[in-house]
Image: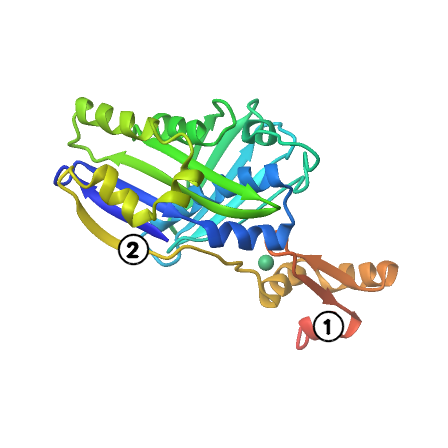
């Protein structure tokens, strides 16, 4: 659930996200260790926020966080309407201890954001990671790459391998927001040191009213984020057809069948000799 409101009669937008169900879906699929669940929970929350702002149906977001941390590279995707998915190279990293998000993500590397609006060239933004805790990395990305000095507070509370609460509070200025107003907003967001814990005490709506209600707010429609994979047998078939019939039959000869797994949802697609021949019917 993403709650949004305009502040100061149009000078900034605040979003309060509760992404608990989405993060638990990701945990069910990927079996994350608790530290990885906190890192990926934050990254998925950010992906939901950014793809929730998309206006066009076919708009697509890809985020690659490559910080040389214990979890390895993380890849996240979001479709218009905050339909998100993601995976990380080592989903079970640091399972035996309480590692920080920075340790899972790492800080020696980059944050790459690709926004595909269906134009000739997708928008491609790249920034260095600040400390790998995701909040500051994205705040820096927005400022450096999108010229939007944003305030970002994300948090995931886990217990017994599950996500108890996950979400975020993000404030972005509009062009007519003064530096003083940006400063006031950033100062408020800086006080949200544990958004997961805060969401246990207050709902997203209550957070909105309690902390931002006195800034001339007008509410925008809610967005319902979710963990959704866009893979399908048809898409895999298109990919296989591009490889060519001979190549595919040769693979089947050595391996018995072609098995293609989806990294985002762990679904397996199996193609045997008859399936491959069927792909090239009439060709
Ligand atoms: Zn999938």
Outermost front residue: 201
Marks 2 and 1, Cα distance to the nearest angstrom? 44 Å
Quarter of the image for residue 243 reads bottom right
Residue at 46% x, 46% y is: 165
Ligand 1 contact, mark 2 (Cβ < 8 Å): no
Q: Is residue 207 visible?
A: yes
Residue at 64% x, 56% y is: 262
Residue 184: percent from the left, percent from the top? Answer: 22, 25
Tell me the quadrant of ligand 1. bottom right
What residue does disc 1 label? 275
Residue at 15% x, 32% y is: 176
User: Depth check: 68 or 216 in front?
Assistant: 216
Residue 229: percent from the left, percent from the top? Answer: 53, 58
Tag nearer the camera, 2 or 1: 2
Q: Closer to the N terminus: mark 2 or mark 1?
A: 2
User: Depth check: 159 or 239 in front?
Assistant: 159
Quarter of the image for residue 250 reads bottom right
Quarter of the image for the C terminus: give it. Answer: bottom right
What residue does disc 2 label? 222
Residue 270: percent from the left, percent from the top? Answer: 73, 66
Above-or-below relation of 243 to 4: below
The secondary structure type at the circle numbered 1 is: helix
The secondary structure type at the circle numbered 2 is: strand
């Amino acid at each position: 659930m993403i709650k949004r409101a305009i502040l100061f009669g149009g000078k900034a937008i605040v979003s309060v996200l509760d992404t608990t169900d989405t993060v638990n879906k990701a945990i069910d699929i990927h079996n994350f260790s608790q530290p990885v669940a906190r890192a990926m929970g934050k990254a998925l929350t950010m992906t939901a926020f950014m793809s929730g702002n998309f206006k066009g149906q076919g708009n697509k977001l890809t985020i690659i966080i490559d910080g040389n941390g214990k979890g390895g590279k993380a890849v996240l995707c979001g479709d218009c309407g905050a339909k998100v998915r993601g995976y990380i190279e080592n989903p079970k990293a640091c399972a035996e201890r309480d590692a920080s998000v920075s340790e899972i993500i790492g800080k020696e590397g980059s944050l790459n954001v690709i926004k595909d609006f269906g134009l000739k060239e997708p928008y491609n933004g790249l920034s260095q990671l600040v400390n790998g805790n995701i909040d500051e990395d994205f705040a820096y990305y927005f400022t450096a790459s999108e010229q939007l000095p944003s305030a970002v507070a994300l948090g995931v509370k886990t217990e017994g391998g599950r996500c108890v609460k996950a979400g975020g509070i993000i404030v972005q200025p509009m062009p007519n927001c003064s530096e003083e107003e940006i400063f006031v907003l950033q100062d408020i967001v800086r006080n949200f040191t544990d958004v997961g814990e805060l969401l246990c005490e207050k709902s997203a709506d209550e957070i909105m009213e309690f902390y931002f209600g006195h800034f001339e707010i007008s509410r925008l429609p809610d967005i319902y984020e979710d963990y959704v994979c866009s893979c399908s047998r048809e898409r895999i078939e298109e990919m296989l057809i591009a490889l060519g019939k001979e190549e595919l039959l040769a693979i089947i000869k050595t391996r018995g069948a072609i098995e293609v797994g989806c990294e985002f949802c762990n679904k397996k697609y199996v193609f045997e000799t008859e399936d491959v021949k069927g792909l090239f019917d009439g060709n």
